[in-house]
Amino acid sequence: MITITINDQKVQVENSSTILQAAEQLGIRIPTFCHDKRLVPHGACRICVVEVEGARNLMTACTTPVAEGMVLYTDSDKVAKTRKEILELMIENHPLDCLTCEKAGDCKLQDYCYQYDVKEGPFHGVKKSYKVDDTNLFYTNNQNKCILCGKCVRVCNELQCTGAIGQFERGFDTHVGAPFDKGMEHSNCVSCGNCVSVCPVGALMPKSKERFRYWETQKVRTTCSYCGVGCQMDLVVKDNKIVDVKPAEGPANDGLLCVKGKFGYNFVNHPDRLKTPLIKKNGRFKEATWDEAYALIVDKIKNTKDRYGADALAGLSSARCTNEENYLMQKLFRAVIGTNNIDHCARL
Amino acid sequence: MTNSINEVLDTNVIFVTGSNTTESHPVIGAKIRQAVQRGAKLIVAEPRKIDLAKDAEVFIQIKPGTNVALFNGMMHVILEEGLHNKDFIAERTENFEALEKMLKAYTPERAAEICEVDAEDIRRAARLYAQADKASIFYCMGITQHTNGVNNVMSISNLAMLCGQIGRESTGVNPLRGQNNVQGACDMGALPNVYPGYQPVNKPEITEKFEKAWGTGLSEKPGLTVSEIMNAAGHGDIKFLYIMGENPMVSDPDTTHVKHALEHTEFLVVQDIFMTETAQFAHVVLPAAAFAEKDGTFSNTERRVQRVRKAVEPVGHAKPDWKILMELMNHLGYQKMYRHPEEIMEEIASVTPSYGGITYERIDEKGIQWPCPTPDHPGTKFLHKGSFARGKGQFMSLEHKPSAEEVDPDYPLLLTTGRILYHYHTRTMTGKVDGLNRIAPESFIEIHPHTAAGLKIQNGEYVRVSSRRGSIVTKVKVVDTIEKKVVFMPFHYAIGAANMLTNTALDPTCKTPELKVCAVVVEKLSQTELDSLRSYAAAGFIG
């Protein structure tokens, strides 16, 4: 452990910490775009700069390790002025369409511009004019909004390990895309959407069937219902409808999802969902009440058991249902019906 | 899994076999690749050159159904070169001598002949695995869905014990569970021979315990497995069948056989979220809530019990499955009421030793990995530390056995089946998601270019594929990632269904059908067949 001073507060921190980690320990928030604790520190966006006493320049908090006796200021006038300039440069060529941008309310650029009172770029220079790449079926890539933090590319390379996207060209023309600018559909992208989930601005956006504002939504943490990995995710809900899914930092998935978990949620609201019990009469299904359905099932269970014994009944439980439901299903067959004829598809 | 998912990041050697991890368990696939980027070496033994094969130090393209021969060949090399873990064998295992004797006959050359691979690759894989500080095996249905599936699994255990690659962090034998809660369904006793927590139904003291807990008399006679239930139903011996959240018309082998069984059941109840292929046969269909519409828990492949939370109200009159089951029990005269799934979990914990310490409060943030016997137990990151459940690990002497069906002049190709990234199981859910359907709209068969040329068929053409059980039409994908005598089909699709073709032959112990190997013939369609196919396509049935 070493001792440093942040904003006149003396603290002991691990000597392997970065300034950002040390500040986080104290609950001091430093703005970041390109930082993600799962990735190798990058220092690309510069927004996390802090003042280190004795240093010639401001230092990026995400890449600079702490040192014994370091004296830091995370929000001095100099820091605030520099961050403001960085934001001005970023929005200089950023389309200021926040009124209709789907990312509004969940956009770091918007939040920091508000925090540092940045309304527009001062230079009135050239704006980017990329065609929006909507060739992927699940998300769009609008490079006019990209701030080149590089997080999407690093997540694709370092965590998803697919390497479908990269940064191309130099300087003002730098942009993120698929190899040879051929469009996402011609890349080896597996549509996991992990790049979309980390984009701090509106450059990579899910194609949503619903129009919503993030402030109209609630998030509900749950477990993905596809494979057995048990990824944690937040269902983003508006008006009793799932409108988006965001990966959560679960012990099994560490903020990653696959295409099914991230984009495969529309089945929940699909019009073909079964909405009422159905009883087959003369070969055709007729809508029924729960009481009618229960009465018929109870009658059949009792009759079958009386005529043939409990072992003439069997149940298939479900690897798709919860533990509680599987427990009740086997309890129904064992304790109430009286047979051990209960299995599910595990052996298939 | 004996170990936790994240332990893969610190493994030195990862051995993947019978699992197309990046497609079937994508996030674990990504973590395996992260480990490779950090320097871990990867061994892949698969019938197809799957995506992970590109990252492999050793890739062995084995003939489907020959895993025991491969493992025996590897163990032969390990013993021959003295790479086995003598201390581990002496302290923690028994029956080593019998295994050693049996392995003498499995020279890598002989194993290579059975697996149709290069003996040198078997040697390289054996050395890599045995010499690793920490080596971990990942497998899935490519190991279990065989008539010798149990032997495959025990053979993997032999290999792990021989090298002492188990019972420590970042080692282990790691079966990847396919469905979100297949682990939990097993844990909860949705199995014919055990109560929750794998407590046998035919042990008097266990029966007594559950009779007391549930306040009712219980049968000590083990029930029928799913394959046996289908057989019995077909013979008219099962009169009443209740299927919750399963679609055997697509997922089970030999669809014709399943259809016969469902049609011959006097009364069939199907409880699901959509009108599935199976629900069509039901006498009563009950509408269930989807995962986002209910509370509960799932247990993942690393034994972690995690919360499922209700985000939206159930559609229409649909109800959560637990509520339907409870109400039905009540209507049958069993008066236990639960106000919330949390109360069911309290009951589970009270009768299931491995879940004894699990409460909703404790699992709220990160879940807990069972065994978790008491409220102060932290859960179990990896199994078999210090000793195995039975005490000493028992080596089993297992010979290679051919699959139930081999190729012959009438059925000259081996069909193996599996999953693809863009669909899940029988497509009940993913079939309703536009983007996924646009990427993977229809059934297909992967064929080697040489085989395709021999049959004068081209990429994208529709062909007839037949086995002894049935015949279907599907689209050809010519790929060089498969061997000449092997073809592959995903089993997701109800039209052009792979399971019309698959074999119902069972593993004698666990009754798992041999879904991964059957003999088929691929034929070009006649002009008449092509014409009728076009009219089908015009009507929107395919394509």
Image (cartoon, coloured by chain):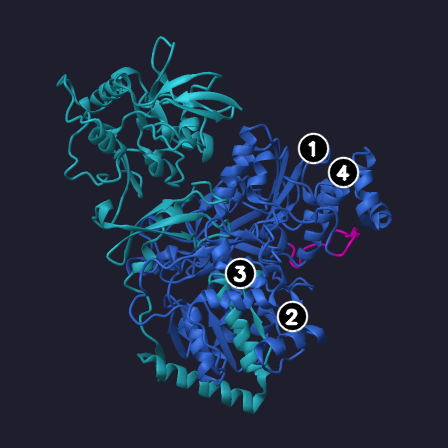
Chain colours: A cyan, B blue
Determine the CA span between mark 2 and mark 4.
41 Å
Look at the image and say whether residue A93 sits in the magenta stretch. Answer: no
Is the residue B409 above or below the residue B470 in the image? Answer: above
Tag 1: amino acid: Ala
Residue drawn at (52%, 33%) of the image: B34
* Visible residue check, residue B22: no
Range of residues picked out in magenta = B390-406
Could you tell me which chain the residue with mark 3 belongs to? B
Q: Nearer the viewer, residue B510 or B340?
A: B340
Mark closest to the chain's N terminus, 2 or 4: 4
Could you tell me which chain the residue with mark 4 belongs to? B
Helix or strand or loop: what does disc 1 sit on? loop
Would you name the residue on which mark 2 appears? Answer: B193
Quadrant for residue B253, please give it. Answer: bottom right
Residue drawn at (43%, 41%) of the image: A256
Residue B358 percent coordinates (x, y): 54, 58
> Could you classify mark 3 by the number of other residues whose Cα lies within 10 Å: few (under 14), some (14-19), or many (20 or more)?
many
Mark closest to the chain's N terminus, 3 or 4: 4
Q: Nearer the viewer, residue B521 or A230?
A: A230
Verify CB contact (< 8 Å) between mark 3 and mark 1: no
Helix or strand or loop: what does disc 3 sit on? loop
Could you tell me which chain the residue with mark 1 belongs to? B
